[in-house]
Amino acid sequence: MNTYDYLLVGGGVIGCSIAYRLAKSGAAVALFDSEKAGKASMAAGGMLGAQNEFERENPLMEIALESRDLFPVLRDELLEESGVDIELRKAGLLKVAATDEDRSALSRQYEFLLDKDPSVVWLEPEEVPEVEPEMTAHTAGAIYLEKDTQVKAPLLAKAFLKAAVNAGVHVYEHTPVQNLLIQNGQAIGVTSKLGPFYGERIINAAGAWSAALFTETSFAPPVIPVKGECVSVKLADQAPAKTVFAVDGCYIVPKRNNEMLIGATSTPYSFDPAVTAGGIRSLLNRAARLLPVLDGGIIERTWSGVRPQAADHLPVIGFDPFIEGLCICTGHYRNGILLSPLTGLLMEKYLNGCPETAARLAPFSPGRFLTKKEESLV
């Protein structure tokens, strides 16, 4: 009989991080993905924008900062455990106001971030090219965030997956989970095309697909898919070193070999993988306005991905309010890569009953979405 301590549904970077940490703690873990494990995380830009993402107080900010700061040690750990280099780059990030209309919002974010970290620097338009020579001086100012770094997302997903397998995780790719097995209000397993699997705990980490799992028998987290289109441009030379993120949401992330990853459009409620001409045109126009050198580059590829966004834009992490033994970990939206290291560590502690970790994760509990009527049933 296929019996494990944990059955983990979803093989993206979050699911693989959790599986890796649970296996390292000595647990028997099975990981299921309806396609190829790691595929859901391949589209991400890889930004570790723990400061870039926040403009005001947010319960996620402390966790985001802590997770970002884990990456140097994680890089070395995953290289040893998996043989994969995640390509951590430490050139920093420029948050840019492309127009005068964006400047006031950026200025408010600067004041908020500076109050917490004196290393945050405000740049007037003429100062921007001094920090990143390939940037235009025709902006309305920028913030330089030297601590916001980046990795190559596909390599991080691959590294977590290989490390999980090497730690003993059994990975079942192209094996969609069909149903949840429940006995006396307790989740005891799942069904699949390979038959039933049994576990002490089941973890729903299926990202944008998590709301569709087990909906007839459990709580459905209010998470929607948000499609994003991306394009990469290869430059012959004069490649910028720093990540550039515009207030309007367009970003340019320099990778090795002069590849510039540009993203991302935003289309809610869409799983459609198609890449549109209009989406790519919009990205290229906005990106080249900030980095004119892109006009001389060659388009290498285009692609799309789907991000899981919760109703209040915070992750959904915690036990299902109705089914014992079922845990939810989803809704990381565009911060899945950034939050993956700490999410794995926190979930291992949480699932093993650590009260301090439970308190840290309380703001992200699925129970926050319950109606008063539903709360009375818990």
Image (tube, rainbow, N blue to C red):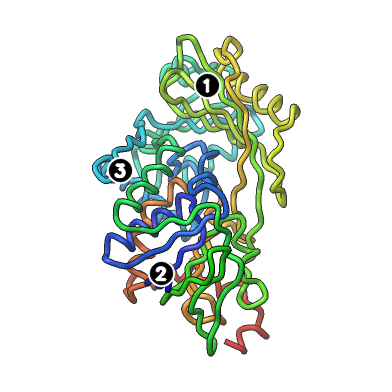
Q: Quadrant of the N terminus?
A: bottom left
Q: Mark 2 and mark 1: span between their CA atoms?
A: 53 Å
Query: Quick one: 35 or 205, which is closer to the camera?
Result: 35
Q: What's the mark number on residue 137?
A: none
Q: Secondary structure at mark 1?
A: helix
Query: Quick one: 378 or 94, which is closer to the camera?
Result: 378
Mark 2 crowd level (few <14, some 14–19, many ≥20, 10 Å Cα): many
Q: Is residue 349 left or right of residue 10?
A: left
Q: Amino acid at mark 3?
A: Ser
Residue on which the image places disc 1: 125
Can residue 252 be seen by looking at this rendering?
Answer: yes
Question: Which dot, 2 or 1, sits closer to the camera?
Answer: 2
Mark 1 crowd level (few <14, some 14–19, many ≥20, 10 Å Cα): some
Residue on which the image places disc 3: 82
Q: Secondary structure at mark 2?
A: strand
Q: Mark 1 and mark 3: span between their CA atoms?
A: 43 Å
